[in-house]
Image (cartoon, rainbow, N blue to C red):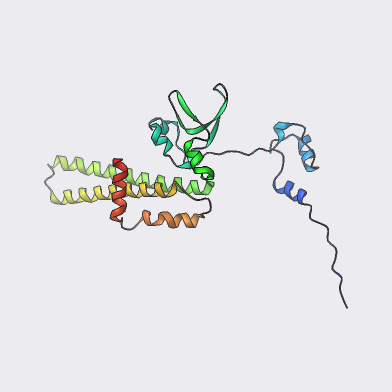
Amino acid sequence: MSTQPQSSQPLDLDAIELRHHPAVDPSACGTCRTLATASKPLNHPECARRATLLPAPDAPDYEQLADLTEDQRANLPARFHTPVWDDLGKPNTWACAVCWGDNWFSSWPCETAAAAGWKVFTPEHHATRAAADVAALIARVRELENRLDERTGDAADRALENAQLRTENECLREQAEGARVRLWLIEQTLAPVDISQDPAGIAGNVGPYLDGPLHPDWIAAYHSAQEA
């Protein structure tokens, strides 16, 4: 006994697309919602769904940017060089979120964004991980520096004659220096993050810098960068 294949209706791809990617904004009026369901044009342009451009979670704020030179701003990671709409200037234009200063700004794409291409728009989970890792290292650097300051003050009171205290101070200095080197290495690693890397891959890239011994070449590269 043979069986005939049952005919099937073709997939309604438009309906599937509409269900998963609605054409209306969540705040759209009822009329436009009904029209969108029927795959008809909307009555109100303001009811159409729009893409939302979000800055990186670890993007620097105004106070942090105010202390940076033009070159330092240009060398910030590509994910910070996102476009912002300037509706105050004449004429209105797209400007870079970080390439600006007193009486100057860079139109978007700035030189850094143009060179980085799609890397400007980093996946959110990559940037969130970078923000968490860097924040933790900064906190560790500050903790070690505070402890070092406390020990240095105590040592001054005792004329820095205690050999054990000098050894402990030296150890703290080395730890603080090591934390600064680790922070610098991770910033260099995360700056050119590839969109094709998954979180596990990124963890593998920065993992060697979070713990374990620091290679002398890494420390030398850090000092060279600070002197440049």
Who's the residue at 45% across and 23% down the image? 103
Hey, which residue is sitting farthest top in the picture? 90
Expressed as whole percent of the image width and height from the top left, the position of residue 171 reads 23, 51
Q: Residue furthest right?
A: 1
- In the rendered structure, the answer to whether residue 7 lies left or right of residue 143 reads right
Location of residue 63 by image quarter: top left
The structure residue drawn at horizontal position 44% and vertical position 31%, both measured from the top left corner, is 62
* Residue drawn at x 44%, y 48% as measured from the top left: 190
Image quadrant in which the N terminus is located = bottom right
Q: Out of 184 and 152, give the one closest to the viewer.
A: 184
Residue 165 on image: x %, y %: 17, 49
Q: Could you say which quadrant of the image residue 6 lies in? A: bottom right
Q: Is residue 48 left or right of residue 60?
A: right
Which quadrant is the C terminus positioned in?
Answer: top left
Q: Residue furthest bottom?
A: 1
Front residue of 165 and 81: 81
Residue 23 vs 193, above or below: the answer is above
Picture mark count: 0
Percent across and percent down for residue 5 are: 84, 68
| Residue nearest the observer in this picture, 111 or 51 | 111
Q: Position of residue 128 (x, y in %)?
A: 49, 46
